[in-house]
Image: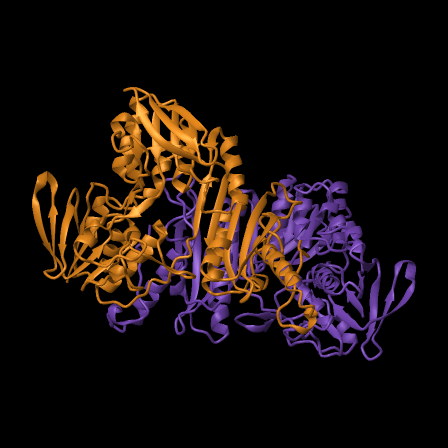
Chain colours: A orange, B purple
Amino acid sequence: MRLLVIGGSDGGISAALRARELDSDAEVTVVLADAYPNFSICGIPYYVSGDVGDWHDLAHRTRSDIEALGITLLADTTAARVDVAAHQVAATGPHGAALQLGYDRLVLATGAVPARPPIDGLERLGPADGVHLLHTMGDTHGVMASLTSRQVSTAVVVGAGYIGLEMAEALRARGVAVVQMEALPQVLPTLDAELAQLVAEQLAAHGVDVRTATKVTGIDTDGRRLAVRASHVTSDEVLDQEADLVLVVTGVTPDTTLARRAGIDLAGNGAIAVDRRMATNAPDVYAAGDCAVTHHVLLGETYLPLGTTAHKQGRVAGENALGGDRRFAGSLGTQVVKVFDLVAARTGLRDHEAAAAGLHPRTEASVADDHKAYYPGARSIHVRTTGDTESGRLLGVQMIGAIPTGVHKRIDTAATAISCGLEVDQLCDLDLSYTPPLGSPWDVLQAAAQRWVAATTGDSGDGRPVATTGRSRSSGALE
Amino acid sequence: MRLLVIGGSDGGISAALRARELDSDAEVTVVLADAYPNFSICGIPYYVSGDVGDWHDLAHRTRSDIEALGITLLADTTAARVDVAAHQVAATGPHGAALQLGYDRLVLATGAVPARPPIDGLERLGPADGVHLLHTMGDTHGVMASLTSRQVSTAVVVGAGYIGLEMAEALRARGVAVVQMEALPQVLPTLDAELAQLVAEQLAAHGVDVRTATKVTGIDTDGRRLAVRASHVTSDEVLDQEADLVLVVTGVTPDTTLARRAGIDLAGNGAIAVDRRMATNAPDVYAAGDCAVTHHVLLGETYLPLGTTAHKQGRVAGENALGGDRRFAGSLGTQVVKVFDLVAARTGLRDHEAAAAGLHPRTEASVADDHKAYYPGARSIHVRTTGDTESGRLLGVQMIGAIPTGVHKRIDTAATAISCGLEVDQLCDLDLSYTPPLGSPWDVLQAAAQRWVAATTGDSGDGRPVATTGRSRSSGALE
């Protein structure tokens, strides 16, 4: 059994490792375009910030760790063409060497490429000018080189999604003045505006100059400094901002060039089409990670490129490539981001996402302390709970709180509940942990659930006394 | 509708509040034996430690908060007899006033009383001598009075369960030398010995002199100082310890005097027998909280007095007393305790508990960092995962880690998974949150689950290649 994996990041390495675990006789080869196998892309901002002193530490495993497991790594090797009928991959190795790689099973884990928004000058300017996209370790070295050589005092970060926010924080940690420009009306557009506002305030409190509803239209250079031109999306007011560094981090698109050329089906959303077994339509070809579609627990097929998902999909692909029959259980789009002292997390669907999927969502806001107020250090957690008014099911939860409030793992309880199909009301029944320094007898999620149920039942107006129904009204009788 | 509730702590007040929510016309009366309605008993150690400056703050709600909701509070009133046929309760109010209280529905929430281990002298000595049980606010005032008047420099804490550990920490915070004596071979007997050992080390590191397998046999006084005599349970070696204060915190037993006298059925475990609706065998009489049996998700009827459970049971009793039909969903014995800088949590069953229940448990230990090691401050979380080798189901999880590792809310994910009947392997499929400063792509619970699955499948020795089975082997391919 010869398993060939194209791509050396989360999806590809997970597939290779899983295959290795299951069959120590399989020949497992990973082709990667750069020299950085199994690097934690999510860790890049923490290397830029200085929290991680040595970029080598960002590797989940070192090259020799992986090779010691009997996996062959072909670094600096670009796969150029897949012949699915012949089970062959043509590639270009170091120094232009032409390689022809045969396989019994192939896993495509080509990942994603950074989106290139239509900004005048972006096609012309690059790292040498202090203009950077950021997705790979190579990109990261470019940013670090600019930070050193250009004596950066001001940076413009284009985009205020997860990576944009983390990079704004990283640059602030280096003493750089940061102007953050986001075309949408709010930062962190994956969260409801009410919560995103708290994130914007946190950014401002740490000296990030946040400009929402601001579309960058052009970047120019005088050979030394950069000039960023932007316009307000509604007023057309023009903003000119000088900078020493511009970072464009406005999302990614799946890298499907190889798959497309090989005649492998893509989904309507542009990612490689795979079933729940991570199999493509081509015989013996699987795909995993940011290049492939994401099966969502509540939405079905979508595209939600996340490291956690890539790991899981890779593991499924690696197992099935060896003849297994494992299904990817599905994503809930669970995400968390640390923004200075604040943590914002979400899982499942927001109101408009659920409505677009034909569900009947209702979203309720609530605020509760992370632990009993009498014990020192209690901090607020802001929650938005989305449930389906017809089925009563929990559809999504968003949370924001300071780091010690633990929202990053509180969201996991919600993710588990959604995965298991719990009704919002059933959250109140869960036996969750409590001790006064760390919680409350009714957990924050349960307080939020009670509020949702009370509001929803109140709205139903059916006038039936709760006493005669199986489901019950609840209200804020919490401590 | 006249609802009478006997007991003003978590179970009783929750029942009263729920009834009030559902029917603003109901007459809701709560009888409580002392003057402290709705106090957070779990918070007592934090008042003793000084973390909570004013004991009034330990109230979940003030008396006037409760009365403002239209609930009548009869404080300092002891219910003496329930006539279930006549729907009457005889009570003694302040200054010995005899009261006769009629009801349409009755909720017994009489709580528990501290266990009195067979220690010579314990029946004779009391708060005036510096010997204390600790369960009520009255007891707490007694302890505080002793601490002040006796110039306590050394205390013996008898018992090393949750409260014992919290009180040891509280006394250390006041600069008191603490000798902690536990008859069982380990501290925190509700956790496996391997994890309890970490707790014992934490206690020792903070100056608590821990003596396990040490049974206190007698307490004596010379009128000023106390002499505690204990013996090692296996060697019979005798230990004599002088102290200024002795705290006996060795668990509780349900307070069922009133129910028993009224002819209400008790369960084999000694608590008031109730069904899932919290109804006793007597007409119109419900029971909730520490006086009643606990329905356990995995074990059925048991006795596990916990504040979280009392709140939930009270809410169910209050709703059903008004004609509702809500079921108590069941406890998992989810518990968490902070011991200095460490947090220990558990949910579900431990190995021997599952075996005793006729299940086929296997328990695997694992250790993982709370977040990516490259980001500063990563700390270990020790996990013990118990699953059923026949059904594959998750039965229990125990966890220990430093406060910032968030084990107190990580345990909730496990509790939710157990409640929903997930298999251990299915934990690996959950879409849990990840960002490098706060987690890993495979969550700690998922790493633990993979280890359990790998060990369990390895043991099965059936030789089938995983590729042909629906369930899969896993191993530690985690990052």
Q: Closer to the camera, B120 or A207?
A: A207
Task: Tell me: residue A113, above or below residue A259.
Answer: above
Task: Tell me: residue A203, above or below residue A21.
Answer: above
How many marks overall? 0
Any part of residue A149 in sight:
yes
Residue at screen point 28% across, 40% down: A136
Q: Closer to the camera, B364 or A238?
A: A238
Task: Tell me: residue A44, above or below residue B215.
Answer: above
Task: Tell me: residue A208, above or below residue B207.
Answer: above
Q: Closer to the camera, B393 or A259?
A: A259
Residue at screen point 51% across, 31% down: A204
Q: Closer to the camera, A341 or A166?
A: A166
Residue B132 position in % (x across, y down): 72, 53
- Left or right side of A163 for A369: right
- Left or right side of B439 for B137: right
Q: Quadrant of the N terminus of chain A?
A: bottom left
Residue B95 position in % (x across, y down): 91, 58
Residue A137 position in % (x across, y down): 27, 38
Any part of residue A70 in sight:
no
